[in-house]
Image (tube, grey):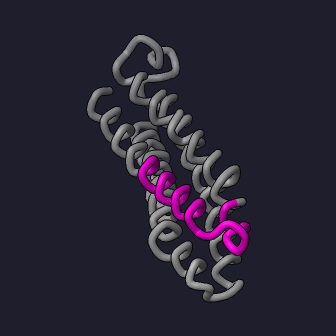
């Protein structure tokens, strides 16, 4: 392989990792919001609580990995020097802020809400899972916009 071929392959692998991570992040929030948390509320047992907690943990790792690939993508595309003062940079910063909020919602709000469904009901867990899903979809839209701006 020539140097250019290696660069193209590396760029593709980084973008693929970023998109795959984002897909798992959005899908994980969708599964929590629309399948797992409603089942917990029906009193289907402790297994769904464990599944929900494991899914939230997976979202934390997936989100962190997605953000890591995103940082690498920045260096391989327009660079950190173009983050401020450009439309592309505004999209990247907005998507990054949403991603950081998503990480906070997962471990800081959703996980405790799932663990307290027996005491407080399922409304907080459903709310945080739905907010996470909406924000994840929004982040994908923002980052898609950055691709076409940059």
Q: Determine the residue located farthest toward the top in the rendered image.
A: 85
Task: Write down the quadrant of residue 143 in the picture.
Answer: top left
Residue at x-position 51% and y-position 53%: 132
Residue 103: image x %, image y %?
62, 47
Horizontal side of 108 relative to 11 (left or right) equals right
Q: Where the C terminus falls, by quadrant?
A: top left
Residue at x-position 59% and y-position 69%: 122
Residue at x-position 53% and y-position 42%: 99
Looking at the image, residue 117 lies above or below residue 64: below
Horizontal side of 84 relative to 47 (left or right) equals left
Is 116 one of the magenta-colored residues?
A: yes
Q: Determine the residue located farthest toward the bottom in the rendered image.
A: 44
Viewer-nearest residue: 136 or 16: 136
Viewer-nearest residue: 81 or 110: 110
Looking at the image, residue 61 lies above or below residue 36: above
Horizontal side of 48 relative to 8 (left or right) equals right
Residue 20 visible in the current orientation: no
Looking at the image, residue 58 lies above or below residue 96: below
Residue 24 visible in the current orientation: yes
Task: Write down the quadrant of residue 113 in the picture.
Answer: bottom right
- The stretch of residues the image draws in magenta is 113-136
Looking at the image, residue 55 lies above or below residue 124: below
Is 87 one of the magenta-colored residues?
A: no
Task: Write down the quadrant of residue 5 in the picture.
Answer: top left
Residue 72: image x %, image y %?
54, 36
Majority SS type along the magenta span: helix
Viewer-nearest residue: 55 or 11: 55
Residue at x-position 41% and y-position 23%: 90
């Amino acid at each position: 392989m020539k140097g250019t071929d290696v660069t193209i392959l590396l760029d593709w692998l980084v973008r693929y990792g970023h998109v795959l991570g984002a897909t798992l992040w959005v899908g994980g929030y969708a599964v929590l919001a629309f399948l797992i948390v409603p089942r917990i509320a029906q009193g289907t047992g402790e297994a769904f609580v464990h599944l929900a907690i494991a899914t939230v943990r997976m979202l934390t790792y997936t989100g962190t990995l997605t953000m890591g690939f995103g940082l690498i993508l920045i260096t391989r595309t327009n660079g950190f020097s173009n983050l401020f003062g450009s439309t592309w940079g505004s999209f990247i910063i907005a998507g990054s802020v949403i991603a950081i909020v998503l990480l906070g919602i997962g471990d800081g709000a959703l996980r405790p809400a799932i663990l307290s469904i027996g005491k407080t009901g399922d409304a907080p867990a459903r709310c945080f899972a739905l907010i996470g899903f909406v924000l994840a979809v929004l982040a994908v839209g923002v980052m898609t916009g950055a691709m076409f701006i940059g």
